[in-house]
Amino acid sequence: MQIAGIPRVRLANLPTPLYEAKRLSEALGGPHIFLKRDDLTGVGLGGNKVRKLEFLLGEARNRGANVVLTAGAPQSNHARQTAAAAATLGMEVHLVLTGERSEEFRGNLLISHLLGAHLHFVTGKTMDEAVARASDEMVRLAAELEGAGKEPYVVPVGGAVPLGSVSYALAVLELMQQANDLRVRVDWIVHATGSGGTQAGLLVGTRALRTGIRVLGVRVGYEFEPFEERVSEQANETARLLGPKDVTFRSSDVVATRDYVGEGYDRPTREASEAILLTARCEGVLLDPVYTGKAMAGLIDMVRKGRFGRGEVVVFWHTGGEPALFAGAEVCGPYLTAG
């Protein structure tokens, strides 16, 4: 894989730790579970978006941008990490958030405010309508900022574009180096997948490096359909950026289960809360109710159903999101406090 010529700024604390979750593995009586801690990438409390922002904001700076815009839900991890990365680089940041302006800032919204982000709120009768309005508002804001003599750069929602996915193709190389040092052969990567950018990158990295690792995404919402087609197309575009010409994907190469979404994105499930509690009490590691809690719920259920061999090594890629634990009952639901 070649990254020469792709602009990049250094933001993340890399490599993130990889270690065996021995007490969790023992509690489940299944495979050897390892944790890849991308919640510890550092900037703005960390998370998987920091890796992507190294390339996205690298392109922004290469274009001479001094203002960054992006969109997301009020408790968006992506928005929070974009605000943090922009602050680190001394860039103005505007966040267009889908929902009513809250009277009380909590969780990711509070952190984005502390980081100096300009917050804009849009609403719609449906989520799709709100997202469309957010996109229109970013276009309007970018034009307004340009008219004021500034150079805006729009970061796609979630960083789910090939340039962002490049970071996770490279992250596989990081994983393989760590696994070799530990003398461990990785069989599976399990992770939360939302818009699919992280999964696209992981697919490119595992195949380009001929690792034999199977990538299994646990979906956290019902959006972004047709999902497998979307991710495979993004993986192909990411591979073209990085150069390996023999790496191509079809939708059948994308494995992403919808079995643990519950009622939808940002809607808590009892199983996710149980997974959060088990992981915290076995490993001292916090997960969030929107992304990693649902992914770990999926992993736990699949272990119990015999999806993985007892002697296999499964890497749970922790993509961050812990500030959602402090967002309130509408995100966490009643299950955590009841546990």
Image: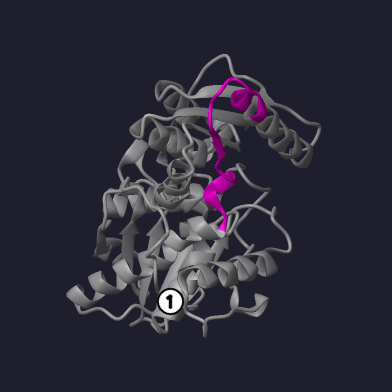
Q: Position of residue 47 (x, y in %)?
A: 40, 47
Viewer-proximal residue among 223 and 54: 54
Q: Quadrant of the N terminus?
A: bottom left
Q: Position of residue 312 (x, y in %)?
A: 36, 81
Q: Position of residue 78 (x, y in %)?
A: 50, 42
The answer to if 151 sits in the magenta stretch is: yes
In the image as oriented, which residue stretches furthest toward the right?
125
Q: Is residue 20 above or below residue 310?
A: above
Q: Residue at x 73, y 28 (%)?
A: 123
* Residue range (magenta): 143-161
Q: Which residue is mark 1?
A: 206
Q: Quadrant of the C terminus?
A: top left
Q: Residue at x 46, y 31 (%)?
A: 66
The answer to if 13 sits in the magenta stretch is: no
Q: Left or right? Give the position of 304 relative to 172.
A: right
> From this viewpoint, is residue 338 visible?
yes
Q: Is residue 307 above or below residue 6?
A: below
Viewer-proximal residue among 290 and 282: 290
- Element assignment for label 1: helix
Q: Left or right? Give the position of 84 relative to 178.
A: right
> From this viewpoint, is residue 98 visible?
no
Viewer-proximal residue among 223 and 137: 137
Q: Amino acid at mark 1?
A: Thr
Q: Residue at x 24, y 63 (%)?
A: 19
Q: Residues within 10 Å of mark 1 (few under 14, many from 20)?
A: many
Q: Left or right? Give the position of 119 relative to 38.
A: right
Q: Position of residue 118 (x, y in %)?
A: 53, 22
What color scheme is it?
A: one colour
Q: Residue at x 43, y 73 (%)?
A: 205
